[in-house]
Structures are given as structure tokens and as C-alpha cells.
Image: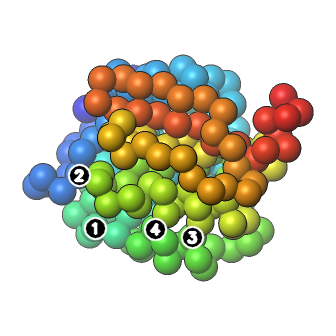
Amino acid sequence: MRVIAGKAKGRKLVAVPGAGTRPVSDRVKGAVFDTIGTEVVDARFLDLFGGTGSVGIEALSRGAEYVVFIERARKAVTTIKRNLEITGFSDRATVLHEDAFHYLGHADADELFDIIYVAPPQYQELWAKAVLTLDAGHLLAPMGQVVVQIHPKEAQDLPLRELVPFRERQYGSTLVRFYAPKDSVQEG
């Protein structure tokens, strides 16, 4: 596992001890950031299920202004902090040892994110709960996007009011869906 582009390109990241996390492959991570493109530059980025921190760190390496990592597993929190030290991005990140849904329910209403990355543990419908919560919430910037990483078997249509899916890509056993506020999709 490594940073694949940007300022920290090539830096090796440490994995979370044990089998509790499933790091995103370099292929999928690269494809996601190729799709996001320059929108990551100067973005405020939320890595909702932080894991190793690989995705948020990739965002920082590619020019994101700031990343907030949410992770409830203590070993993963320690790993994210270590990976931020390895890459030199600790000063541009906050790592919160917290349940993602608690965070979503109690986050500062003034803190908006340009990109929210959702890659929770599989087969628990946590991704759907997260997207539905974001749909009803206040954390996404008006021109922002939610990027969801799931197994294709988990895919389902959601009863959304404010967000709409606008792009979907499959890479082997990984499906990546992009959501945005419906007003921003109609305009752009």
C-alpha cells in the first residue's frame, strides 16, 4: 500500500494490524482520483470510515487543503496517525476516534466538505445508511460530491431527496458510485 501520486508519491503506508480493515487497491484508488481530477485541489475532504487513512492521505498528496478522518477502531486510528507522520501531512488533518454515524449526527453545521468518501465495512448496509444521512444532512458543500466504495452485490437504489447518483464505475469486485446535490448536477 502506497501513495500513488502527488507530493508524497511512492511513500509506503503501514496497514492496520489484523484483518479488520480492507484497504482500497491502488488500481481503485487511482481510478477514483483520476475521476475526481483537479476537484481535489484545495478541497476539504472527509474520510468517513478512515481505515488505514490511504484515501484521505492520497487526497492530501494530490493537493486537498484539509482532511478529517473518522474511525472508531483504536488500532486504525493509531495507523492513520502513523501514516500521516510518514507522509508529513499531520498538520493538514484531524483524526477523530469516533463512530461515523455519531459524527454525522453531531458534526459542526458550519463545516462543509467538498468531497466525502464513504467506504465502510462490507455487507452491513452502512454505506446506504451513510448516504441517506448525508442526504438529509448539512455536511456536503453545495458543489460537493460523495464518493462511495462498495461491493457490487451491495448496490441498491436509495430514496434520496437532495443527492443524486451521477457516475458509477466498477473495478473487479469494487463498485464506486458518485453522488452530488441535484442542483449542482442539473447546473453542470
Given contact means CB atoms under 8 Å apart, are the residues at marks 1 and 4 in contact?
no
Residue at which label 2 appears: 21
Residue 123 in the image: state x and y as whole percent. 29, 54
Helix, strand or loop status at disc 4: helix
Residue 75 in the image: state x and y as whole percent. 22, 63
Of all residues, the one furthest to the left in this rendering is 18
Of residues 183 and 154, the one nearer the viewer is 154
Residue at which label 3 appears: 104
Helix, strand or loop status at disc 3: helix
In the displayed structure, 131 sits above or below 24; it is below
Q: Disc 1 marks which amino acid?
A: Ala
Residue at which label 4 appears: 100
Q: Disc 4 marks which amino acid?
A: Ala
Q: Is tag 1's residue or tag 3's residue first in the polypeptide sequence?
A: 1
Given contact means CB atoms under 8 Å apart, are the residues at marks 4 and 2 in contact?
no
Given contact means CB atoms under 8 Å apart, are the residues at marks 1 and 2 in contact?
yes
Q: Disc 3 marks which amino acid?
A: Leu
The residues bearing labels 1 and 2 have C-alpha atoms spaced at a distance of: 10 Å
Residue at which label 1 appears: 73
